[in-house]
Amino acid sequence: MPHDHHHHDHPHIDVDSGDRRVFAAVAVNVLLTFVQIVAGVLSGSLALIADAIHNLSDALSLVIAFVARRIARRPADERMTFGYGRAEVVAALINYTTLVVIAFYLAAEGVNRLMDPPEVQGWIVVIVAGVALVIDTATALLIFGMSKDSVNMRAAFLHNVMDALGSVAVIVAGTLILLYDWQLVDPLVTLMIAGYILWHTGREIGPVIRILMLGSPDRLSTGEVLGAMEATKGVADVHHLHLWQMGEHEASLEAHVVLEDDANPTDVKLALKDVLTSRFGIAHSALEMERWNDRCPDALRIGHACGPKSKATHRHA
C-alpha cells in the first residue's frame, strides 16, 4: 500500500510572520479577559466569567505556544542530540491539560449555580460576549494557518475555537434571560461549555501523548513496515525494531537486519532505505547489519529485551 506523507495543499506561513500573529493574538486576548471579568462581576453572570477564565487560558496557551516555537527552532547540540523540536509537543500537552482542568472547574461551578442560581443582567452579558466572539474569531483566524502543520499551534487554536463557541453559548444564555428571565440557563450553558471542551480535548490529546511516549505513528502499520523490510532481497530476518515519531511529522526507525549468506550489506541497506522512504515516508533510519552466525540471540522482533523473555515473543527464521 503506497503512502504519501510529505505533500501539503496549504501554503506555509514564514516564521517571523507567524510569531507576529501569535504576539498580536496574545495582546487582544489579555485585553478581552479583563473586560469580560469586569463585565461578569457587574452582571452576575458565571457564564461570562467562565468565558473570561477560558479566554485568559487562551492568552497563556498562546504564550506557551510562542515560547515553544522559538525553542523548537534551536539546532541539535551536545545536550539535545535530537534537537528541540519536541518542545512544541510538550507545549501542546501543557495546553490540553490546562483545558481539562478549566473544564472541570467550570463544571463544578456550574453545578453549584444550578442549586442556587443568582440574578444575571442579560444585556451586559450579550454585549460583552458579542465583542468577545468577534475577538475570539479574529484570534483563531490569525493562527489557523499555523495550526495545520503544528500540534502546538493546533492546541492553541483549539483554545480559541472553544472560546468562540463559548461566547456564542453565552450570547444565547443572555438572550434567553432577557426574553424569558430564565436564570438557570447561565449555569446550564456553563456546563455545556465544560463538556464541549472535554470532548474536543479528549480527541486531540491522545496523539500528543503518543509522540511523547515514543509510540509508532498512527498513520503507519508496524507490521506492514516489518513485512516490507523482510520481503526485501537479501534480508533473512529483521528484529530489534523500533518505530517512533521524532516530532509530529518525522517518523524514525531502527532495526537489526540479518543478511542472507550471499547478500551484500551495502546493497541491502540501500534497498531497505529506499523502501522505507518511498513506501512509508521514513527518511531517518538506523540499520545494523548482522550475519546469521552473529545475530542477536533470542531477539525480539519489536523492541529490545529487558530481562527474561517469553518464548512466545520470539521469532526464529
Image (spheres, helix red, strand yellow):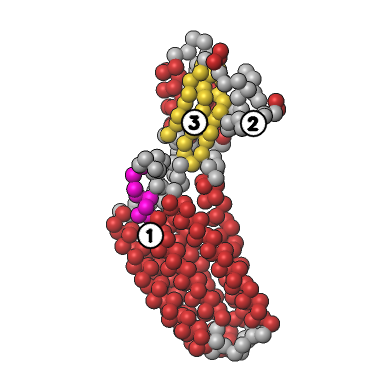
Residue 195 in percent (x, y) is at 61, 67
- Determine whether the residue tagged by mark 3 lies in a helix, strand or loop: strand
Residue 275 in percent (x, y) is at 46, 27
Residue hosting label 1: 66
Q: Residue furthest left?
A: 16
Residue nearest the observer in this picture, 140 or 302: 302
- Determine whether the residue tagged by mark 2 lies in a helix, strand or loop: loop
Residue 128 in percent (x, y) is at 46, 82
Distance of label 2 from label 3 (alpha carbons) = 20 Å
Residue hosting label 2: 307
**Numbered circle sitting on residue 108:** none
Height in image: 132 above or below 208? below
Asked whether 72 falls inside the magenta stretch, the response is: yes
Residue interval drawn in magenta: 69-76
Residue hosting label 3: 254
- Residue displayed at 47% across by 81% down: 37
On the image, which quarter does residue 61 sit in? bottom left
Badge 1 density bin: few <14, some 14–19, many ≥20, Cα 10 Å:
many
Marked residue nearer the N-terminal end (3 or 1):
1
Amino acid type at mark 1: Phe
Distance of label 2 from label 1 (alpha carbons) = 43 Å
Is residue 36 shown to the viewer in this render? yes
The reply to whether dot 3 and dot 1 touch (C-beta < 8 Å) is: no
The reply to whether dot 2 and dot 1 touch (C-beta < 8 Å) is: no
Amino acid type at mark 2: Gly
- Residue displayed at 37% across by 72% down: 28
